């Protein structure tokens, strides 16, 4: 089993679940109202979390892959 591929898949699934939850919360907030002010904070928070999860996960994955590559070259 290729560990980076598993981690990458997990990051993508967590991100998709986060956005699915966000869409559900937005639809509940909007039911029967025209309240953009309420959903603005939900969407902004979710976009920030998505950036942190995907960006941080990818940066960590690339860092670990580079470290393993350097170890294999040295040893």
Image (tube, helix red, strand yellow):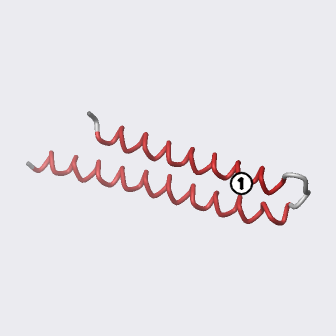
Q: Quadrant of residue 4?
A: top left
Asked whether, in this view, residue 71 is left or right of residue 30, the answer is: left
Residue appearing at x 50%, y 56% in the figure:
53
Q: Give the image location of residue 28, x and y in percent.
A: 77, 53
| Nearer to me, 51 or 62 | 51
Asked whether, in this view, residue 4 is left or right of residue 51, the answer is: left
Residue appearing at x 73%, y 66% in the figure:
41
| Nearer to me, 11 or 64 | 11
Residue appearing at x 20%, y 51% in the figure:
70
- Residue assigned mark 1: 25
Residue appearing at x 15%, y 45% in the figure:
72
| Nearer to me, 10 or 54 | 10
Of all residues shown, which one is farthest toward the left?
75
Asked whether, in this view, residue 48 is left or right of residue 9, the answer is: right
Q: Secondary structure at mark 1?
A: helix
- Structural crowding at the residue carrying mark 1, measured as other residues with C-alpha within 10 Å and reported as few (<14), some (14–19) or many (≥20): some
Q: Give the image location of residue 64, x and y in percent.
A: 29, 52
Q: Give the image location of residue 38, x and y in percent.
A: 80, 65
Q: Quadrant of residue 40?
A: bottom right
Q: Give the image location of residue 29, x and y in percent.
A: 79, 57
Of all residues shown, which one is farthest toward the top?
1
| Nearer to me, 59 or 57 | 57
| Quarter containing the N terminus | top left
Report the number of discs: 1
């Amino acid at each position: 089993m290729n560990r980076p591929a598993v981690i990458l898949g997990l990051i993508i699934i967590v991100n998709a679940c986060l956005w699915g939850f966000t869409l559900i919360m937005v639809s509940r907030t909007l039911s029967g109202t025209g309240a953009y002010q309420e959903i603005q904070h939900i969407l902004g928070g979710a976009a920030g979390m998505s950036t942190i999860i995907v960006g941080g996960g990818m940066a960590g994955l690339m860092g670990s892959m580079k470290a393993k590559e350097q170890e294999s070259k040295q040893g």
